[in-house]
Amino acid sequence: MTPGPAPTAPAAPPPSAPGSAPPAGERAAEPAGGGVGDSPPRPDGTLKVTGEFAYSSDLWAENMLWGMTLRSPHPHARIVRVDTAPALRLPGVHAVLTHEDVPGEPRYGLEVRDQPVLAAETVRYRGEPVAVVAADHPETARRALERIVVDYEVLEPVCDARRAAFDPDCPLVHPPGSVPLRPEHNPRGNVLRHQPIRTGDLARGRTVADLRERADVVVTGSYEVGMQDQACLGPESGLAVPAEDGGVDLYVATQWLHADQRQIAPCLGLPPELVRVTLAGVGGAFGAREDLSMQVHACLLALRTGRPVKIVYNREESFYGHVHRHPAHLRFEHGAAADGRLLYAALEIVLDGGAYASTTPAVVGVAASLGLGPYEIPHAAVDAYGVYTTNPPCGAMRGFGAVQACFGYESQMDRLAEALDMDPVEVRLRNAVGRGSVLPTGQRIDAPLPMAEMLERARALPMPPPPEAAPGRVDPLALPGGAGGAGVGASVVRGVGYGVGLKNLCFSEGFDDHSTARVRLEVVGGVPVALVHTAAAEVGQGLVTLQEQIARTELGVRRVALHPADTSVGSAGSSSASRQSHMTGGAVKAACEAVRARVVALARARGLLAGEGGGAVGGADGGVRLAADCLVPPGGAAPVPLAEVLGDAVVEETREFRHRPTSPLDPVTGQGSSHAQLGMCVHRAVVDVDVELGLVRVVALDAVQEVGRALHPRQLVGQIHGGATQGLGLALMEEVQVADGVIRNPSFTDYLIPTVLDVPPMRVEVLEHADPQAPYGLRGAGEPPTLSATPAVVAAVRAATGRPLTRVPLRPEDIALP
Amino acid sequence: MDFLSPDTWAGALAAKAARPEAVPVMGGTDVMVELNLGRRRPHALLDLTRVPELARWGAEDGYTRVGAGVSYTRLVERVGSRAPALAAAARSVASPQIRNRGSVGGNLGGASPAGDCHPPLLAAGALVELASAAGVRRVPASEFYLGPGRTVRREDELVAAVLVPEPRGPQVFAKVGPRNAMVIAVVSFALALDVAARRAGTGIGSAGPTPLRARAAEEFLAREFDWAGGADPSPEAARRFGDLVAGAARPIDDVRGSAAYRRHALAVLARRAWARCAAEVRGGGV
């Protein structure tokens, strides 16, 4: 299968061929069997905790070269001249490539093929790749980059997203017609998608002014969301190995192997089957690895030099080398009756997509369709815009457009509560959606979504003890300001705030969302072993554990091994959109069911199972069960060891799983059942604020989340903790600061993410109202807490300070300066 | 790049004399970051981790002499009460892992205006001991800093130690940043009182091209402080003190904060420092 030499560092998850699976005794010792609903240890957990796990940056191959990227120093410029000759003359340099060396398609893109492999005439963001080199040492490669001569003619940058959206005189980032935008996305000027939604009277010719007159109270607000980074600890990295068949084997940290393959192959001028992609160890993803970074570059260099080429970005380069969360400008207006019932909403959402589209169209679709949040509002007008600018490209990040909208609508709910002198929870309860509610897109919520119950539960959670005001008795680390020692108890004010987030789960808007699993059952060393093979990317979320659990539950085996994720099996789709437990979980379940049916048939054929028919399988119906490495016949007959049933037989089945179809949004009315499934999280934040210094300490950040079914309770709570922490980060500190198209803080010295002193212990209440549409009734859980945590923290700071606080992340001076 | 690794102090000074351009490296918490980011490509690194003298500390003629290689962790754990403001600053540095590696010498060698150790050294009236193959000199901290990354240290010299006077009154340090730990100071402030001499020392960090003293504020506090009883300052006096400290700063707008916020926060830190020192005097702690 792999003609080229294999790299020596193992891909992750570490190849656990049946022979190298963990000892059966270790797994058998788990009290509950390690199936669905238990919390078995991760197969990669010990390696990661002990520092022995091989990440993509650890890859190494004999005779390997190092690739490095020359990047634009300007956010917007015309390339006048490139001279690579001085770099090529440097001993140890094996290749210097520019756009002229790209043999196939010059551009790629997840949704829109608009991003050059290497810039040709124009650079559109600072950090855009212009040339790549391969050399026998990283230092040689670095020196080669310094010798490449590029003459630029600097152009006016397009930095202001609102101007890009609405000013007809704004320079265009892409010449009209030069990028393949979709007409149903209403592209115009720098706008690559405009998604309107009109409902109720606002769809019937009435204006917002008409509705304003009918409302007892109107609240308006302008809000801003800064550019958040996924802050993966593992930089973009991978190893491309040229193969004897003219193809290439790429080992890379990514989120979606087949999307990489689909984009890389045309640029190389190769058919997809000659671009084989294997997942390498992923050090965090959160959306940052959905787009290509170094993939095509490494493959180009490997094919040109005939040698393996490794590329690892450094930290600063990484900030320029992956997409970020879209900064957003929000203008929201809500009208309500005196009793708090919402009457109408008018929203304008502008999302800065940066220089290339990435997933901006889909982000716009989510922001528009979920812009009203989980509230019943009879009349709505939503206009969501995604625009090109010459800022760093933005794309997928946990929450994907819903995070930005959620900060807007939750801030508005608090304003409404204040205007009505009503409790913030009460306002939310009066307008809460539930099963049977209709979203502004016309989509009916047809699964349980007990928002009112969730709010009541969040409100009823025990409060942390009050702040200790007496000096001398306070641990300074527990005060706002923490280790800096600036805090004094007397200046601390406490506040409480709530946030509710509604997130679509799985891919939306008519996308053919599916995953594939191949499951093999055979006897190894006398015991039955299931081998699960998917192309699903383990990015830290624990999908490897779930795959093992599902196989144990469905096949009744103790030992499960995982094949490395690669493109020799069908696509699993992306490890994003909170979708892999649902989609790849569903595919593994379906493949296991098919294997199980064949095992039962085999048992009958071998005379090990009395009776007729082979279809009745499963526990509840009294049919045949597989459990404890045995086939358990119905009616109390003695179990038959699976090893005996199988003998030398190898039973292998491959299945694709799809969720129910979804619809695109109408380009004029925004109507369409665009989402497969919805998830919700409610957060209550308690903060202490040093009002004089503007410093915040989050004391509690407790959550109630609807998950349908907890497959692995411990990992599930970890996901909710992690999502909430990223939301807290956006509220208080995480921002890629961009000025005139230049990132001012491309390092973890100045891009701050929460530390253990910033994150409180978090209580999580998990509700399990099964979604009948999903395997085991589950809902993806990774994203919803990222939505709700941010507005909850900000609301709590507003409650403590009385400040309006319309921009995240909050800065100390927003609180402290008059 | 050459890597020089002497195992004696004399050897280190000889190496620096022979290769003045060699960049000293101790814990590497600054130097390695710069190297990894490609901001610095020195021809030689002078590794000082094997020089035993640098890791020593002890009393010396009314001072505590802290070797340039004493880690922040050791400073907090072992030297603490002999240099309270410096220990508080060391405690606020980064994370436990970095405090295990980083040292005062590195802070002085790098001379970032945001370095946490500078304000307490200024406030306490510490001396910086510089050594070369030609000899040793001791420079007051207030004369040590020249500009961002620039000090009076000559190319052939190494920072050998700091000498912090025995505390003769309360000392406090505080810094402000948007994160509760592991943060570069947006602004920092140290105050050290000499109760017997009725004198005050101040140090301002991250609010000017170098760490700064607020001399007018020091004189004002010396006049207004209740040296006998440790009474809280009047609101007017506290405000005046804060304004004088803020007025001594020369902050800029940058990625970590605005000049306006820095001045504001300095005034708050200064008022709180006075109150904390007064409380200590009242409590008879010193």
Image (cartoon, coloured by chain):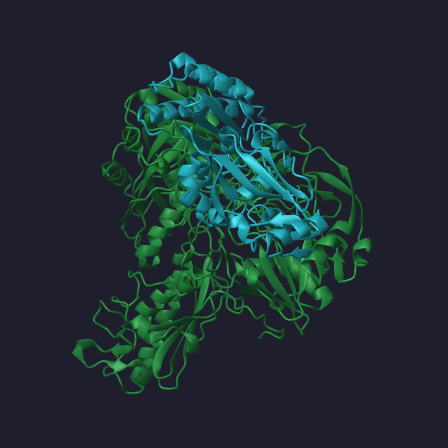
Name the residue located 72 percent from the left edge and 51 percent from the top edge: B18
Which residue is at the front of the view, A151 or A692? A692
Q: Quadrant of residue B151?
A: top right
Res. A526 visible in picture: yes
Left or right, residue A588 beside residue A54: left
Res. A343 visible in picture: no
Which quadrant would the N terminus of chain A be assigned to in this image? bottom right
Left or right, residue A661 beside residue B28: left
Which chain does the cyan colour mark?
A: B
Which residue is at the front of the view, A405 or A17? A17
Which chain does the green colour mark?
A: A
Q: What is the total number of numbered labels drawn onto the structure image?
A: 0
Residue sitting farthest toward the left: A636
Left or right, residue A182 beside residue A579: right
Percent across and percent down for residue A635 are: 17, 77
Which residue is at the front of the view, A443 or A602? A602
Percent across and percent down for residue A77 are: 73, 39
Residue sitting farthest toward the top: B236
* A21 versus A423 height, above or below: below
Percent across and percent down for residue B144 are: 61, 33
* A778 versus A705 height, above or below: below
Which residue is at the front of the view, A245 or A63? A63
Left or right, residue A796 beside residue A305: left
Percent across and percent down for residue A778 are: 33, 55
